[in-house]
Image: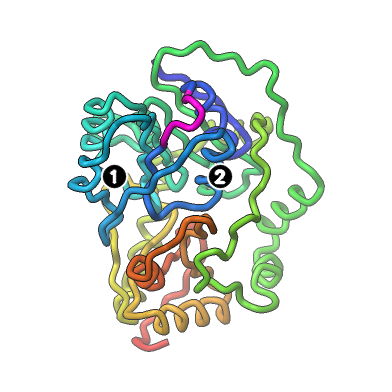
């Protein structure tokens, strides 16, 4: 069984999906140690406990450690396709089956591309994606894929309503790019070096359905065109990154629709220089993610995180051949 429910964002979709799974309060959800604070809060707001599993430098689980975990009171594991690059899902499926727990799939940095005769978002018991993050011109858009037999009723869920601010921001971005870019990059650069930069900024976990205009646009998405656009920008940024001594973490493969090009800087100061250059030239270059404040990060892990640099793949990027910026 595959059903899709369109919500206003990924948080709302995940919120509703957890309700459908019927997870017991105080049961444990296994989350990757690199995860946005807002994703953690979705589970905590449901009175669930979270436990973080470790990742290697390529954002893959360290299965030798996860396999040692006792299954008592564990109800689910979250599989995240980081930045839009697919995880080795067969290992997650095997683990979930072995432990008799739910597999929850987070595909919020991509779209439902086909992978080994399956589609991202439709691998776990439930899956979530967030087209509003990927596709320009959407007011809202987060989808819940329900991949097991479950009766669904969402007639009482309220709808997302666009306001004047949403409307004006979208029109500005679409029709007056230079003005929008000036507005976006005005003032002091955000402190991308902070692991808690955007913590506590997302607090709306209401379950609301998508607006009609966004839903119509999502129905017209051409996955092949989205792949081609991101592939071309990926290789342009890849050339720039390598000239400036950054090492890519993921490779662009056939059919992928990633949200970011991700690289590793030489050190924290090198990353800071890249952030400064991007801000000064009105090019978006960010760190990721903003962590949950109550999750204490180890020095080793934090030092690794400080080297990560992310280039969104939905922007204009100049042709630059100089080695040093």
Q: Are marks 2 and 1 in contact (CB under 8 Å)?
A: no
Mark 1 crowd level (few <14, some 14–19, many ≥20, 10 Å Cα): some
Q: Can residue 75 be seen in this view?
A: yes
Q: Position of residue 2 (x, y in %)?
A: 41, 19
Which image quadrant: the C terminus? bottom left
> Regarding mark 1 in the picture, which secondary structure is present there?
loop
Q: Give the range drawn in magenta.
A: 23-28
Task: Report the side of 69 relative to 228 (left or right).
Answer: left
Q: Which of marks 2 and 1 is nearer the N terminus?
A: 2
Residue drawn at x 38%, y 25% is: 125
Asked if residue 137 is positioned above or below residue 308 in the image, the reply reads above
**Prevalent SS, magenta region:** loop
Q: Quadrant of residue 307?
A: bottom left
Q: Disc 2 on helix, strand or loop?
A: helix
Where is residue 306? Give x, y as percent: 41, 72
Q: Quadrant of the N terminus?
A: top left
Q: Mark 2 points at which residue?
A: 41
Q: Residue furthest right?
A: 164
Q: Confirm whether residue 251 shows in the render.
A: no
In this rendered view, identify the residue nearer to me: 51 or 274. Answer: 51
């Amino acid at each position: 069984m595959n059903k899709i429910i369109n919500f206003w964002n990924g948080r709302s979709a995940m919120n509703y999906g957890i309700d459908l799974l019927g997870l017991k309060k105080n049961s444990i959800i296994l989350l990757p140690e690199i995860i946005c604070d807002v994703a953690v809060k979705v589970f905590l707001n449901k009175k669930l406990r979270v436990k973080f599993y470790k990742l290697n430098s390529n954002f893959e689980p360290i299965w030798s450690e996860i396999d040692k975990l006792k299954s008592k009171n564990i109800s689910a594991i979250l599989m995240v396709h980081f930045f839009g690059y697919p995880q080795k899902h067969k290992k997650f499926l095997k683990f979930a089956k072995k432990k008799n727990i739910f597999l929850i799939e987070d595909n919020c940095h991509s779209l439902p591309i086909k992978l080994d005769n399956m589609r991202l978002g439709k691998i776990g018991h439930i899956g979530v994606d967030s087209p509003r993050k990927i596709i320009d011109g959407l007011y809202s858009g987060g989808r819940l894929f329900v991949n097991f037999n479950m009766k669904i009723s969402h007639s009482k869920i309220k709808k997302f309503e666009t306001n004047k601010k949403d409307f004006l921001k979208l029109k500005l971005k679409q029709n007056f790019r230079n003005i929008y870019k000036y507005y976006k990059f005005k003032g002091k650069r955000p402190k991308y070096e902070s692991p808690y930069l955007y913590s506590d900024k997302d607090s709306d976990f209401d379950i609301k359905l998508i607006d009609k205009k966004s839903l119509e646009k999502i129905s017209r998405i051409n996955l092949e065109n989205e792949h081609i656009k991101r592939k071309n920008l990926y290789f342009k940024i890849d050339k720039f990154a390598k000239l400036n001594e950054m090492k890519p973490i993921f490779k662009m493969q056939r059919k992928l629709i990633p949200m970011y090009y991700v690289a590793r800087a030489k050190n924290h100061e090198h990353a800071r220089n890249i952030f400064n250059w991007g801000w000064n030239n009105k090019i978006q270059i960010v760190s990721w993610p903003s962590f949950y404040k109550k999750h204490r990060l180890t020095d080793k892990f934090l030092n690794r995180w400080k080297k990560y640099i992310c280039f969104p793949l939905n922007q204009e990027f100049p042709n630059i051949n100089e080695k040093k910026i």
